[in-house]
Image (tube, rainbow, N blue to C red):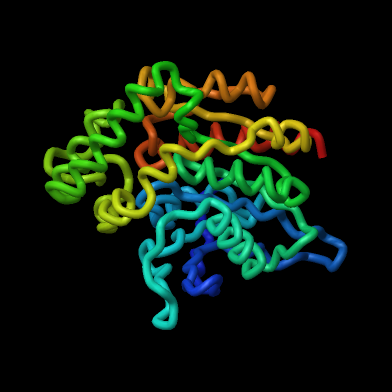
């Protein structure tokens, strides 16, 4: 894993179900011979405020071992509804899976080729759902702080907090609701500043806090991917939680996920979006986790 001479990022678009999907990758290096295998795809799936830009600094660390790639999820950033479509829609986990597979196909890794996934937060839930519906496509999955609310101790209190956030959005707007939402996040005291909605969480500068609150928050809060089916299918999974996320509502249920999946729970650098603030250290430890998942190949 090296960034001494980072390869350039390349962006393109594909379409799926009425939406343009904008993705970014570092293409594989030219193969020295036809017999040299191409590197596996490593797809980074963003969570709420689902812009691909949060992962761009991370991609070079995984080239050329992988073809690293990410995308802005439906109706975030440059992934915009087509003029002929109904417009913005509420998050549908099954549609999000189909979007991810459309991006994978566009990147040159169609079925039956397998690929690796790193999912953060809500992106981890989408990754779990993909592994439930298409386990044969997943070579390995690292889920970073993907909160499954019913597995959280005292999840009724967490749901109250999330519904309070949504009510504030309806009554007083995205700015007030976002500040309330931020109160539940830990490990951000040393980064960002006051009055920066979601910037400290990794999305506000892209301007999609309203998308998150209006179209995604409640769906992601109540979605329960079938972890039992993921385990039964034999998908290789590792879980990750930030060292600065201890006690956070989105982190305290990770041990229970580990027990259901029968997989390891790793501590990694930083907070809920630690890859943005401790990028090199995060990449190094994530690389080790992925190497462990590949050990069974």
Q: Nearer the viewer, residue 147 or 44?
A: 147
Residue situated furthest right in the rendering: 35
Q: Which residue appears at 25% of the width and 58% of the height?
A: 207
User: Of all residues shown, which one is farthest toward the bottom?
Assistant: 84
Give coordinates of residue 297: x percent, y percent: 82, 40
Asked if 253 appears above or below 205 in the picture, the reply is above
Q: Position of residue 6 (x, y in %)?
A: 50, 57
Q: Left of 159 or right of it: where is 126?
A: right
Which residue lies at the image location 58% right of the left edge and 38% below the top edge?
225
- To which quarter of the image does residue 257 belong? top right
Residue 281 drawn at (x, y percent): 46, 34
The answer to whether 155 appears left or right of 189 in the picture is: right
Give the quarter of the figure containing the N terminus.
Answer: top right
Residue 146 visible at all: yes
> Which residue is nearer to you in this view: 216 or 191?
216
User: Considering only vertical position in the picture, is 130 above or below 250?
Assistant: below
Q: Give the left or right position of residue 8, taking residue 296 as reference.
A: left
- Estimate the x, y position of residue 266 in percent, counting from the top left: 56, 24
Q: Give the total of numbered labels.
A: 0
- Residue at left offset 33%, top offset 22%: 157
The structure residue drawn at horizontal position 54% and vertical position 19%, both measured from the top left corner, is 255
Q: Can residue 244 be seen from the camera position used here?
A: no
Q: Quadrant of residue 143?
A: top right
Task: Please give left or right for residue 206 compared with residue 245 in the image.
Answer: left
């Amino acid at each position: 894993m090296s960034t001494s001479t980072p390869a350039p990022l390349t962006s393109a678009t594909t379409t799926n179900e009425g939406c343009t999907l904008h993705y970014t990758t570092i293409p594989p290096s030219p193969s020295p011979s036809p017999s040299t295998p191409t590197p596996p795809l490593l797809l980074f799936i963003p969570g709420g405020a689902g812009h691909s830009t949060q992962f761009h600094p991370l991609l070079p660390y995984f080239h050329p071992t992988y073809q690293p790639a990410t995308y802005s999820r439906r109706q975030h950033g440059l992934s915009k509804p087509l003029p002929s479509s109904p417009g913005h829609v509420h998050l549908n986990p099954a549609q999000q899976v189909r979007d991810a597979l459309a991006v994978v196909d566009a990147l040159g890794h169609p079925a039956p080729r397998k690929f690796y996934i790193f999912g953060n937060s809500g992106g981890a839930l989408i990754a779990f759902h993909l592994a439930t519906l298409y386990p044969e496509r997943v070579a390995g999955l690292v889920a970073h702080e993907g909160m499954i609310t019913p597995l959280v101790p005292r999840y009724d209190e967490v749901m109250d907090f999330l519904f309070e956030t949504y009510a504030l959005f309806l009554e007083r707007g995205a700015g007030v609701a976002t500040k309330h939402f931020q109160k539940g996040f830990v490990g951000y005291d040393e980064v960002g500043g006051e009055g920066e909605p979601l910037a400290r969480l990794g999305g506000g500068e892209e301007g999609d806090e309203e998308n998150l609150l209006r179209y995604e928050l409640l769906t992601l809060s109540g979605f329960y991917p079938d972890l039992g089916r993921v385990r039964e299918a034999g998908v290789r999974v590792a879980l990750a939680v930030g060292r600065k996320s201890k006690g956070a509502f989105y982190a305290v249920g990770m041990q229970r996920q580990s027990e259901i999946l029968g997989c390891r729970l790793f501590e990694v650098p930083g907070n809920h979006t630690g890859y943005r603030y401790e990028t090199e250290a995060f990449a190094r430890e994530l690389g080790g986790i992925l190497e462990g998942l590949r050990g069974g190949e």
